[in-house]
Amino acid sequence: MTTDPAKVPVVIHENHTALARAVAERIAALVRSKPNAVLGLPTGSTPKGIYRELIALHKQGLDLSRVQTFNLDEYYPIEPDALQSYHRFMHQHLFRHVNIRPENIHIPRGDLPRDEIPDYCLNYERAIADAGGIDLLILGIGRSGHIGFNEPGTPEDAITRLVLIHPFTRRDAAADFFGEKNVPREAITMGTSTILASHEIILAALGENKSGVVARAIEGPRTIEMPASLLQGHPNATFHLDCDAAAELTKVKTPWLVTQYHEFEDSPAGKREELRAIIWLAELLGKPIVELSEDDYTSHGLASLVIDRYSDELNRMAARTLATKIRDRDRLPHNERIILFSPHPDDDVISAGGIFRKLVENDNDLYVAYQTSGNIAVFDHDVLRYLDFVGKYLGAMKIDAASHKAIERTIEEFFSHKAPGQVDIPEVGHIKQFIREAEAVSGAMHVGLDRSHCIFMNLPFYQTGAIEKAPPGDADIEETVKLLKRIQPARILAAGDLSDPHGTHRVCLWIIREALKRLPANERPIVWLYRGAWQEWPLDEADILVPMSENELALKLEAIFKHQSQKDRAMFPGPDEREFWQRVADRNTATSRKFYRLGLPFYHAMEAYVEELPLY
């Protein structure tokens, strides 16, 4: 047994809504006790939920009129009304909805002449000091461990200043700017010493993609090479995490290491944790499960597992549990009506291409419902390529091309002065949508689906034409309810990949779950969750493991290749720079190798799925 290596207080919330509500309530409690409180505020996806909850509290009577706010940072150079400006973000997501006075709002300016910046930054520091210091500062955390734009190596005594943005951070921001080349290279940021001088700090993080850096910041050494770890030395700093962001913490991932005698509950969750512990032990020791000894268990914090059972019995049970998860064609559904929901037009083949083919081969009445158009992820040069093709086709077929030529001129003129991130004109948006739809049909047909079974939902929340999407709402849910009632599936497959850095998968899953709640209990289908291009379900969590031969994996990759606009270089690849087909091949083969190393049968590749408990 070891002590919990966490070096800063941690609060783990069930989900992102619970986290947002808790942090907003803490802000509200401070304001009620100190109406002229000084708040330090961030931008990003995590704060959006916090601001929604704070707005709701304001509508219920929370008075913010005497509050002062100081934002952490802003890109440089950037105009305040630019789409990606943090000025615009804060007014859109908070300030225009509450009664904070404009003169009490402070956001670093990104539109100053360069020679004015040093004095401006000193004045920003003085304004914070004149306000009495920051009472409560909310932080996020970047992939490099940055807080604000304080990247690894930032001195602990750094104050507000102009900084170069780390390449990792620029890459992560590329989606917001429609390409990394458009991301500003600099930013004005509150310094680490300014941050650490705050009376109270809350660092909030959501999602699996943050779990690794969060664990290092909480459990690793306190070092300027991990700026978020500097909170370890603060007298009143707390990390607020959802379950996914907390997944790599020792007390969550391997709780048996931090308790004197860890009890495993006699429940489905307890059985899953027990299996996770056995897999962990086998991997730690490099042994097949069936070769684990009683000494192995007792020497690694797992004595409670072998108190009432022999290790051989426990090993056989764990190996048998894993083996029964294998579902090849003969153990997959036959002759059922099924909907495979795909958030983007390629997630069906990227994430579920193996089971997709097997379900078609089993004579299931399978439909693919593409929830969004994915049109913003198409490069402008692809539009010009297709316009050229259409023009040549019309000429070859002796079809009057006058209207086409007029549209082509309109689009070329638009592209000639289009600014990065600018919303496309309708003519361009439609073409990009049709490119994604044609590729989706081609990919689905490659694994055997009839093209008439491809359904393009184009849900309303996605139809902004910009990176920033509208909040999902009743229209999205009702569209999904109508589809479920029309098809009446016995089973659905949906994206449970919450590591998607762009958030669309999370939104699409929420819409499906809300739609299912509107169906009578006896009409709700079985739900299987897949994961996308970011992570795979671990063996202990997976309920269904679908094996693939070398030829079957090759067929899946070929279906992914049909999405040519996403091939070679996707517009929004996220932090993983590999192409999607490379991620898939590596992930699916890694799952099967891990299975094999545990002493179980060898398969070339493997997809994993979780069966979600029914809603009642």
Image (cartoon, helix red, strand yellow):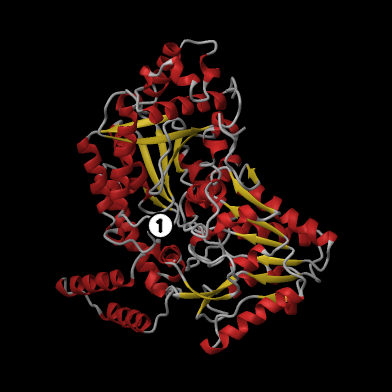
Foreground: 482 or 25? 25
Disc 1 target residue: 575
For the point 35% across and 80% down, the residue is: 415
Structural crowding at the residue carrying mark 1, measured as other residues with C-alpha within 10 Å and reported as few (<14), some (14–19) or many (≥20)? some
Q: Secondary structure at mark 1?
A: loop
Residue 324 visible in rendering: yes
Q: Is residue 219 above or below residue 528?
A: below
Q: What x and y, as percent, mark residue 125?
A: 67, 76
**How many labels, in total?**
1
Across and down, in percent, residue 29 comes to 80, 56
Residue at 48% in and 27% down: 277
Which residue type does callout 1 highlight?
Answer: Pro
Residue 472 in sight from this viewpoint: no
x, y percentage for residue 315?
42, 17
Q: Quadrant of residue 577?
A: bottom left
Quadrant housing residue 542:
top left
**Quadrant including the C terminus:** top right
The foreground one among 524 and 13 is 13
- 607 shown above or below 115: above
